[in-house]
Image: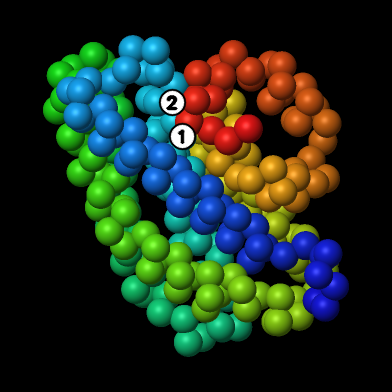
Amino acid sequence: MSNENQPNIGEDYIRFHKVMTRGLAVSLQNINEFLQIGALEKLNREGFIKYVQSFSSVLHGHHQAEDEKIFPYFKDKLPLVPYERLTSEHEIFNDGLQEINTGIDHLTSENDELDSLKLLKSGFDKIDQIWHPHIQIENTQIYERIRSLNIDLEEMIRLQKEDKKFFQEHTGPAYLVMPFVLYNLSPEDRAILTQGSPEIVTKQLLSIDWKDKWTPMQPFLLK
């Protein structure tokens, strides 16, 4: 595929890494601030819980898609990539997500907020410790090289459709996940990601039907 405007699943995954990189930084920054005062800010409590809940769902679904779809597909085409290392690091991320999910459960159950925040901090720190070198390998050794493989256009579209379906089936709820993904991206990347999306999604679901459900996250999202 020589046309730069043609679909490329590698560029989609690089954008998802941008989503999660920002989500990780925003979550840690706010957790550290909340720990300093010993509790969540009441005004943004609901929004922050929804934000970290969305982070957890998106990261888990993203890594499942890589382990079950992306890595097996490209293993023969890009054989020198350290797939076993990447998969083992996904397990470390999952350990962090377990702590994050426990912290979320405690917060929603209104257990001790300080202990809950410490659980969140521990989980996010585990992810943060290896996140950047991890995605550096994936971006440079897999996703930035996909265009040079000259994958047939129809095959690329098929891959993207299968990946999107898999991601939707392994994340949720959609009314939080979709805004989380889109509004942790710059307007330029957001516009590219939503190209071809039905208007019912961008104008009806996001802007009207789901608005009240994800609006509490807005203080943590980009405009």
Q: Nearer the viewer, residue 21 or 84?
A: 21
The quarter of the picture where the N terminus appears is bottom right
User: Callout 1: 10 Å neighbours few (<14), some, many (20+)?
Assistant: many
Q: Residue type at mark 2?
A: Lys
In the image as oriented, which residue stretches furthest toward the bottom? 80
Res. 46 mark: none
Say whether residue 134 is left or right of residue 182.
Answer: left
Which residue occupies 63% across, 39% down? 182
Question: x%, y% of residue 209?
Answer: 69, 16
Question: x%, y% of residue 174?
Answer: 58, 31
Which residue occupies 45% across, 43% down? 23
Would you name the residue on which mark 1 appears? Answer: 54
Q: Residue type at mark 1?
A: Ser
Which residue occupies 72% across, 65% down? 8
**From what the image shows, is residue 116 above or below residue 68?**
above
Q: CA distance from mark 1 to mark 2?
A: 6 Å
User: Callout 2: 10 Å neighbours few (<14), some, many (20+)?
Assistant: many
Which residue occupies 45% across, 65% down? 135
Residue 131 occupies which quadrant of the picture? bottom left
**From what the image shows, is residue 29 above or below residue 212?**
below
Question: x%, y% of residue 220?
Answer: 48, 31
Q: Nearer the viewer, residue 23 or 209?
A: 23
Would you name the residue on which mark 2 appears? Answer: 50
Say whether residue 116 is left or right of residue 151.
Answer: left
SS state under label 2: helix
SS state under label 1: helix
Residue 49 occupies which quadrant of the picture? top left
Image marks 1 and 2: residues in contact by CB distance under 8 Å = yes
The quarter of the picture where the C terminus appears is top right
**From what the image shows, is residue 152 above or below residue 58?**
below
